[in-house]
Amino acid sequence: MNHDPFSWGRPSDETYGAYDTKIAQAPAFPKMNTTQPIVTGTSVISMKYNNGVIIAADNLGSYGSLLRFTNVERLIPVGNSTVVGISGDISDMQHIEDLLEEMKTENNYDNSYVDDEEALKPSYVFEYLATVMYNRRSKMNPLWNAIIVAGMEDKKPFLRYVNLLGVTYSSPTLATGFGAHLALPLMRRVVDREDDIEKTTLEVAENTILESMKILYYRDARSSRKFSMAIIDNDQGLILKKGLQVENMSWEFAKNIRGYGTQKV
Amino acid sequence: MNGIQVDINHLKKGEVSLGTSIMAVTFKDGVILGADSRTTTGAYIANRVTDKLTRVHDKIWCCRSGSAADTQAVADIVQYHLDLYTSNYGTPSTETAASIFKTICYENKDGLSAGIIVAGFDDKTKKGEVFSIPLGGSVHKQDYAIAGSGSAFIYGYCDKNYKHDMSKDETVNFMKHSLSQAIKWDGSSGGVIRMVVLTKEGVERLVFYPDEYENL
Amino acid sequence: MTSIGTGYDLSNSVFSPDGRNFQVEYAVKAVENGATSIGIKCSDGVVFAVEKLITSKLLVPRKNVKIQTIDRHVGCVYSGIIPDGRYLVNKGREEASSFKSLYSRPIPVPSLADRMGQYVAAHTLYNSVRPFGITAIFGGIDSDGPHLYMLEPSGTCWGYKGAATGKGRQTAKAELEKILDKETELTTEEAIKQAAKVIYMAHEDNKDKDFELEISWCSLEGTKGLHKFVTGQQLEDAIEFAKKETSVADFNDSDDDEDDNNDANVSSDDEAVDRDGDINIE
């Protein structure tokens, strides 16, 4: 699968050949909807550990190759046990934020237990988003995003993915976009299977996420150094850290590199 | 393929376009909007003295870029909404105005090519605010915003030279330099530089002619 | 003059020759028989309280909540036909939600009051609908501070410092006037206790029936502007205060108090018969 947001939702060229643009310039029928993302956010990465779950995303809104908005928050807390991380189109992300806000308001109606047993849980938030995503793709008008919902539910970590096609899946480690290529293999070195979760502490998981964000900043041309990270911990609750920076990068080795093969000076 | 290219494809053949340089900057006493004055159909300059700074409320204005027809229609609708809002609930905030712009741009994203900057002065908080609404219909609150085809050439200049809480003269100067560079390198921008200053004192218009801004 | 049998009370959209809309007046009767509800406007928010009569021993205590939330910053309580109130609150929620989605800010309480008032008033204009059988007391905190409104079946919607409706409104109003007859406004913390007292006093006339007290509040500090129920120790304290105050009042001047009660009874009975003596729904 190609994880570049601009290629999402299109029939792959290998299978169907290049897209015939004449189709898009056809008259009013069939109706054309969102055909591409405009301002985009890149990867969201996340992993479980023995007492919770971590999720991270950078703060960039790209406009094509222009790094246009440098202060976009793509981790959205919902209640105090869920964080939704969104990549892809930023206008659709803001629409999803509005939907989640509405969801919270409606959960408050005639509910005496909003702070306790009827508080929104990650699985509720996820099921709602997955339904929205699938309904929109079925109307041929998708929300151009890949979403990861992370949280704690019944003292167990929750982590699940849904994208513009309405496809959903779970895993102890999840990533969208470039992160699926670059960060997932790194995170899987720590947590590969369900039973690895128990062996992984918060400290190890946090370091893995920081390391992955660094690699993404090295190799994703649509990423930024500034990012946010949320930890949903069984004991400490929800901690959203904003304005973090990729640190401890390795660039010194550049001075020893000369030419591109045989050159010595 | 990227967003900018599709934007141009979206323009129907022969449509009048504001291939533009626009910006809005908050400063100590409020906010200033600025724009060039060129409107083109292809390479032909349909209007060389356009006014791209549009009033939607007493102290909430917008800079328009993209299709002239689309942005005029959107601004007219927003003006209507804000009139209605004012008679019902009193003076709207800049955020409310931006939200109406956003709703229209987001819900009609497939039919519109409109990149809009909304800027306003809030008489209650005595602060200027700027919201950028690019093509897809997302909203971004910023200290200053630049947009339009000419803005591509001045990202570096603006980033280096913008300072918080500048005086009015400093701000006008900063914008004059920025827009003059944008006009210099962008064929779709040109003519005069127009500005609108929004402060507690009221609304002030400024115009700068090529002989002045070309030789800064 | 009695208007019964003249036919002017059968349709909503028809005036009687002396300029009255009988359907609206009958709706008011429905309210006057309802459980007492009150609202108090404070310096830092609003407080709502309602008397919840226990109509059956099989009802689960503390469930079957009456006070509702319209938007996160607006609460609502009402007396009369409860489902009518639910319906009105749903309308209020729609208005609040659509306002927020277009203007990206919470609806100002006066605007919400205006919209709900117009909706209720519209139900007095068409013969295909009946008026709302409730009087709603609602309010909350917005960017201009606290607001409190009372909305009647006619669509009349006025702002109040303290509002009371339902069966015990006479007593409650008299108590509220005493409580709010000061230069400085109450704080919400104080008003919670006073509200409990008012409901307990208003219940005196109806002593044979058991009741539960329900209180909610919007407070700048206490609830960060949101509408929340008063629960746990805070509720217990308020009930204890109310019980103490009412028993003291009984003990101190039992004669006066009896008179007061009688007065209240008489006046409310008067009201129930009719203000002008020419309506009779029995």
Image (cartoon, coloured by chain):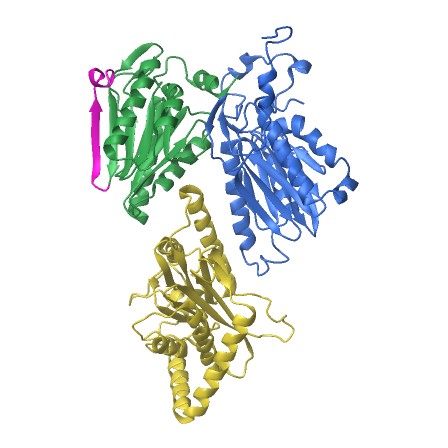
Chain colours: A blue, B green, C yellow
Q: Residue furthest right?
A: A195
Q: Residue furthest top?
A: A262
Image coordinates of residue A17 in percent, x first then y, are 64, 12
Q: Is residue C206 magenta?
A: no
How many numbered badges does the structure rendering display?
0
| Quadrant in which the N terminus of chain C is drawn | bottom left
Can residue C24 be seen in the rendering of this structure?
yes
Q: Nearer the viewer, residue B119 or A195?
A: A195
Q: Nearer the viewer, residue A236 or A72?
A: A236
Image coordinates of residue C68 in percent, x first then y, are 50, 61
Q: Where is residue C280, by image quadrant?
A: bottom left
Q: Residue furthest bottom?
A: C255
Image coordinates of residue A34 in percent, x first then y, are 52, 26
Give the magenta range. Answer: B200-216
Q: Where is residue A191, by image quadrant?
A: top right
Q: Nearer the viewer, residue C244 or A71?
A: A71
Q: Residue at x 55, y 72 (%)?
A: C233
Can residue C84 be seen in the rendering of this structure?
no
Q: Is residue A103 above or below residue B50?
A: below
Relative horizontal placement of residue B127, taking residue C236 as reference (left or right): left
Q: Residue at x 42, y 90 (%)?
A: C258
Q: Is residue A85 above or below residue A237?
A: above
Q: Where is residue A186, by image quadrant?
A: top right
Q: Residue at x 57, y 75 (%)?
A: C54
Q: Is residue B215 magenta?
A: yes
Q: Nearer the viewer, residue A240 or B102?
A: A240
Relative horizontal placement of residue C247, taking residue B115 as reference (left or right): right
| Quadrant in which the C terminus of chain C is drawn | bottom left
Q: Is residue B190 above or below residue C20?
A: above
Image coordinates of residue B195 in percent, x first then y, are 25, 28
